[in-house]
Image (tube, grey):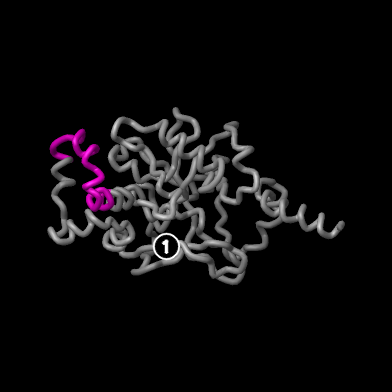
Amino acid sequence: MIKATFKALQKKWNSYKYRFVPWIAVNLGKNERTLRQVMDRTQDKLVSDEEISASLRTFFRALFKSSLQRQQEVLSVLPDSLRSTYQAFPYTIETQKSLDGHHDPSKVMLETMGFSIHRAPSSLQSAGTGVFISAGTVPQGATVAMYPGTVYYAHEPIFFQSIRNPFIFRCIDGVLVDGNDRGISKVVFRSCSGRDRLGPFQMSDTSWLTTIPQNPLAVGQYVNNCSNEKAANVCYQEFDVPAEFPLELCQFLPNVNYRHEVQRYDQF
């Protein structure tokens, strides 16, 4: 009886211990070979924000163009010059008809970025779901995933969302991103996303909460990259989406702020 009780308590602790600084301090040393030490946000940039922003814009524009049938309401309110740019489709008529009927973001990703990724059971023991390359080759410095979810700043309520939730990512400055696609976390994200909508413009993407995300990059919460047996091949880097980011492309950003008036914050 005591043994069973201990195992039950241990299971609960394992699902919650990541929130406690003492556990983090004790366990940091277990992955020294794969750990990248970052003491300050200014030291976090392996790739410049300008490069990341340009890469996202290129990819998101390709996603937008490949789904023009769904974008008619947005196109109707864009300036004529911008609308013409999007409607100048870079594919053949046959390809356009195929994409309109069977929009495949993974194919767009492969054509635009040179690789595509997908979720599948992890090759690491007891690691759950992982992220794998489906096709192509990932060049060094490429943005391979985005960490989706609701963004919480200091003193914002996240206690109930955090219970038994292993998908909360802590940024260097203490900002938290809840990447859980189930339960109360899912409800909060959908609510905040609907709140922020501006007419025909969606300010965030909710499709990452489903099995078919419109932005295939939005799988960062499933990336397993901390193992003593296998060296790290990707790393997280924090990125602030610039204020001038194209409004029509915000529909592919898989993050939303819990509080309405703060700037958007995305993780890669």
The magenta span reads: 61-82
Q: Quadrant of residue 158?
A: top right
Please, is residue 93 above or below residue 21 in the view?
Answer: below
Q: Looking at the picture, how far across and down is residue 144, in whole percent?
A: 40, 58
Q: Three-letter amino acid code at disc 1? A: His
Residue at 67%, 60% in the rendered image: 29
Residue 205 image position (x, y, % from top left): 39, 44
Q: Name the residue under label 1.
A: 118
Q: In this view, does 129 lie above or below 53?
A: below
The image quadrant that residue 157 belongs to is top right
Q: Is mark 1 on a helix, strand or loop?
A: strand
Residue at point 67%, 62% (across, down): 30
Of residues 208 and 143, the one drawn nearer to the viewer in this rendering: 208
Q: Does the magenta stretch include residue 186?
A: no
Residue 16 position (above or below residue 258): below
User: Is any part of residue 40 visible from this angle?
Assistant: no
Determine whether, in the image, residue 102 is placed left or right of residue 15. Answer: left
